[in-house]
């Protein structure tokens, strides 16, 4: 029986199709972003945040299977920088949409934890998590206080070279 909200099941399925080497850590990262957005990226010097975005966009490798945007929740999409660059989308538009999106607080950590528990209980996704070497350590992070964001797994970073920004859907018109 599927215990997940339909949007989450679809988002996980799409992520698995795009990135079959994802791990439990990568599932959690997407869930964190889907509920809380990407405000954690705004911590620190804003000039460094801006420089990092433009450098990442310049260096982002084009991976043919990546869409320009990937829906991760009813509120958020991942804007993949390389395909958007290839389309000729002005980088400042994506950067400003990211800032507007990340500068606000959305869901709460309890929602992340509840959805994580739903994933663990789901017949398909729960079995997937239990097969992952990083499941126990990722689960411990979710249970700990305060809830923290995680980077992608090493395998995910090495294989997929993720270059995206999480943006509210309302700011993206392509």
Image (cartoon, helix red, strand yellow):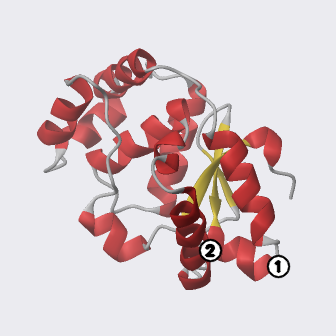
* Residue at 69% from the left image edge and 74% from the top image edge: 83
Picture coordinates of residue 59 (x, y %)?
54, 84
* Residue at 34% from the left image edge and 36% from the top image edge: 125
Q: Is residue 148 above or below residue 163?
A: above
Q: Is residue 78 above or below residue 49?
A: above
Picture coordinates of residue 29 (x, y %)?
39, 44
Give me the disc on residue 158: none
Residue toward you, 22 or 34: 34
Q: Residue furthest right?
A: 173
Residue 94 falls left or right of residue 70 = right
Dot 1: few (<14), some (14–19), or many (≥20) neighbours within 10 Å? few
Task: Say which quadrant the N terminus sits in.
Answer: top left
Residue under label 2, please give it: 54
Calculate the distance from the C-alpha at mark 1 to the C-alpha at mark 2. 14 Å
Task: Say which quadrant the C terminus sits in.
Answer: bottom right
Query: Dot 2: what SS?
Result: helix
Query: Dot 1: what SS?
Result: loop
Picture coordinates of residue 72 (x, y %)?
58, 42
Picture coordinates of residue 90 (x, y %)?
82, 72
Q: Are marks 1 and 2 in contact (CB under 8 Å)?
A: no
Residue 5 falls left or right of residue 161 = right
Q: Quadrant of residue 128?
A: top left
Give me the disc on residue 88: 1
Residue mark closest to the camera, 1 vs 2? 2
């Amino acid at each position: 029986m599927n215990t997940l909200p339909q949007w989450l099941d679809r988002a996980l399925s799409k992520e698995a199709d795009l990135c079959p080497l994802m791990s439990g850590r990568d599932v959690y990262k997407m869930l964190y972003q889907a509920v809380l957005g990407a405000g954690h990226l705004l911590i620190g010097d804003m000039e460094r945040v801006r420089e990092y975005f433009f450098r990442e966009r310049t260096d982002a490798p084009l991976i043919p299977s990546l869409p320009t945007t990937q829906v991760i929740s009813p509120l958020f999409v991942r804007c993949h920088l390389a395909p958007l660059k290839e389309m000729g989308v002005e980088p400042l538009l994506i950067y400003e949409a990211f800032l507007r999106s990340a500068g606000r607080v959305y869901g709460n950590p309890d929602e992340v934890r509840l959805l994580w528990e739903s994933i663990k209980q789901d017949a398909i996704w729960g079995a997937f998590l239990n097969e992952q070497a990083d499941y126990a350590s990722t689960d411990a992070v979710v249970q700990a206080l305060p809830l923290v964001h995680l980077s992608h797994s090493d395998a995910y970073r090495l294989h997929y070279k993720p270059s995206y920004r999480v943006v509210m859907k309302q700011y993206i018109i392509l």
